[in-house]
Structures are given as structure tokens and as C-alpha cells.
Image (cartoon, helix red, strand yellow):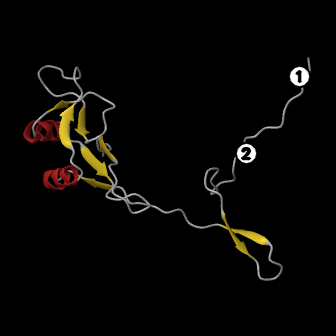
Amino acid sequence: MNYQRRPSSRQPIPAPGRSRSLPASQELDSLGDRPRYVQRPPRTVPTLVTRDHEVIRRWAEQRGARPATMPGSEYNGHLGVLRFDFPGYGGAVLRPVDWEEWFATFDERRLEFRYQDQRADGSRSNFNRLESPPEQ
């Protein structure tokens, strides 16, 4: 048997500030029509943070999302894992809850709602995360 190592198809680890998945753009150099690579800044989308109930509710309702919890995560009669149930996403079985109960748990745990309004391509984003604020 021949156990020679085949050349790797993986790209080497990129230098800092470079992306393996997003190649740099090519432009033609007017001096010899040779391609040169131009580093363009990545498209960034701001992640917003709020505790405002109206902002959270409006964001969720604009996307058709309803407040929910993970069944079995409750303890001592209190909600466990807080989630939003988005239409068309059937990956997890969620139990619907009312806004008042959802926000009561949100406030009791002093959570922050991190979210994005749009993706880098301009389409509506469903990105959200509930986090405890950093200790001060």
C-alpha cells in the first residue's frame, strides 16, 4: 500500500484581519491588467441591547414571533428557558406563554435583550439573545 500524504485541500490559516470564507475582491491594475487584492471592510450590522418591554414586544410582533418557554425547563412554578416562537421554525417544541409571564421572568432575572433589526444584506433579521448583564 502506498501511504503517501495527499496535498491538503484546506486553505492555510489566514493572517489576522483576513477571512478564510470571504476572499478579497479583485480589481484590475491599470498598469498591466494584473489582478490585485483589495481589502474591503466587512459589512457590519449593529447589535442593539434593550430592557424596554415595548421595544422587545414590537420587535417580536413585527416578525410574527410569540413569547414561549422550553417545556420541562420550569422550576418551582417559574418559567425556565425563555424563547420566541417564530412562524415556520419547527426545530424545537416550545410552549406558548403570555407576555406578562414572559416579561415578569425577564425582569426577575434582570436580563438584557440583544437583537438585530437587519442582516448585512438588508433583509430582516431574527437574531436575538437573552443575556445577563455583566457584573459591575
Amino acid identity at mark 1: Tyr
What SS does tag 2 mark? loop
Q: Quadrant of the N terminus?
A: top right
* Residue located at (70% from left, 46% from top): 13
Q: Nearer the viewer, residue 54 or 65?
A: 65
Mark linked to residue 28: none
Residue 25 image offset from top left, x and y in percent: 65, 66
Residue 79 image offset from top left, x and y in percent: 16, 28
Q: Earlier in the sequence, mark 2 or mark 1?
A: 1
Answer with left or right where residue 31 lies relative to residue 113. right
| Mark 2, other Cα within 10 Å: few <14 / some 14–19 / many ≥20 | few
Amino acid identity at mark 2: Gln
* Residue located at (86% from left, 29% from top): 5
Residue at the outermost right position: 2
Q: Nearer the viewer, residue 51 or 116?
A: 116
- The residue beneath circle 1 is 3
What SS does tag 1 mark? loop
| Mark 1, other Cα within 10 Å: few <14 / some 14–19 / many ≥20 | few
- The residue beneath circle 2 is 11
48 w.r.t. 127: above or below? below
Q: Quadrant of residue 121?
A: bottom left
Q: Quadrant of residue 36?
A: bottom right
